[in-house]
Amino acid sequence: MSTSESLLTRDRTRGWRMGLGNMLGKEVAAWWRTRRWWIQCLAGLLLLNGTLALNLQGHVRPDNAAQTFLMMAALCVPVAAIMAAQDSILGEKHSGTAAWVLSKPLRRPAFLLAKLVAHALGLLVAWVVVPGALAYFQLSGAKGLPLDAAGYAKAMGLYYLNLLFYLTLALVLATLFNGRGLVLGISFIVAWSGPMQFIGQPIQKYAPWLELVLPWRLLMDIGRQPALAPFLAVGQRLPAVTPIIATALWCVLFVGVAIWRFRRDEF
């Protein structure tokens, strides 16, 4: 029996979950039975922990080095989530694979959710858990005492929530548009509008409310508004919770719209 055949088993599930188990098994295998997982892990270690190590060796204060770590996580890591989401949907739509797979006993919501769950787990391990754990020891060694593990884990939770926002954003855009340029362009504009000063200043002047409903402040200072993750890392009270709640709601909304739109798409 081939590997592909071994992933396909008789599924008696009915309703919107029909085929979810088989599809999820296929998507998880695409992460952990190929080179994807270690390439993603290596990229995360080089980008995040490599930058952190260079800063610490350059005698940058651990607190400032940690801020740079979060800045890299906010600006660069969403690219991995955006690319993964848009390629998993548009790649299969353009190649005709999606139409072939959906001709089997597989519901469209199950198709989308399997991809979302597999990518969310893969990105969690490769871009949050592995580099985050190593960064904990790097920063603890630089400070000469262990960081508060609970607070640090909460800060990493905001990092992951930020990543999920861009994963689900690219997912819904890939169901709304057929062109990669639009999906990537809109996603990158949203990701970089707040942190990039030349774009952020007009936003602060004309639409400051966007800072409350988008995930920009989770990891980075935006204008005069401080980032939220450092407060959690040191066990201090958060100055605001609206960005956290709004980001979580956006993720749910994006998934809901993606399922609604994908069920009406024609292949």
Image (spheres, rainbow, N blue to C red):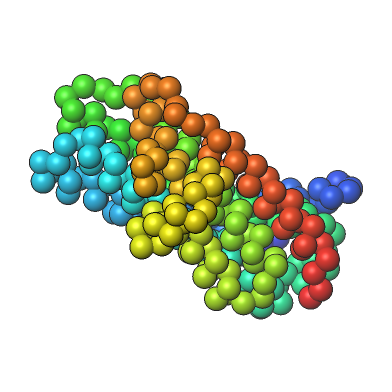
Frontmost residue, 208 versus 154: 208
**Residue 134 appears anywhere in the view:** yes
Looking at the rendered image, the quarter that the C terminus falls into is bottom right
| Residue 85 horizontal/vertical position (percent) | 58, 61
What is the number of callouts on the image?
0
In the rendered image, residue 99, in percent from the top left (x then y), is placed at 77, 72
**Up-down relation of residue 61 to residue 7 (above or below):** above
Question: In the picture, which quadrant includes the N terminus?
Answer: bottom right
Q: Quadrant of residue 104?
A: bottom right
Residue 2 appears anywhere in the view? no
Report the residue at 40% width, 35% height from top.
Answer: 229
Q: Nearer the viewer, residue 178 or 90?
A: 178
Displayed quadrant of residue 89 = bottom right
**How far from the left and from the top, in percent, is residue 195?**
39, 54
Q: Residue at x 17, y 49 (%)?
A: 54
Residue 29 vertical placement versus 143 (above, below): below
Would you say 31 lies left or right of 44 here? right
Q: Is residue 171 left or right of residue 212?
A: right
Question: Residue 24's spot in the image, x, y percent?
Answer: 68, 51
Residue closest to the far front:
205
Quadrant in the picture for residue 248: top right
Please give the name of the residue rendered at 14% of the width and 41% of the height, measured from the top-left corner.
60
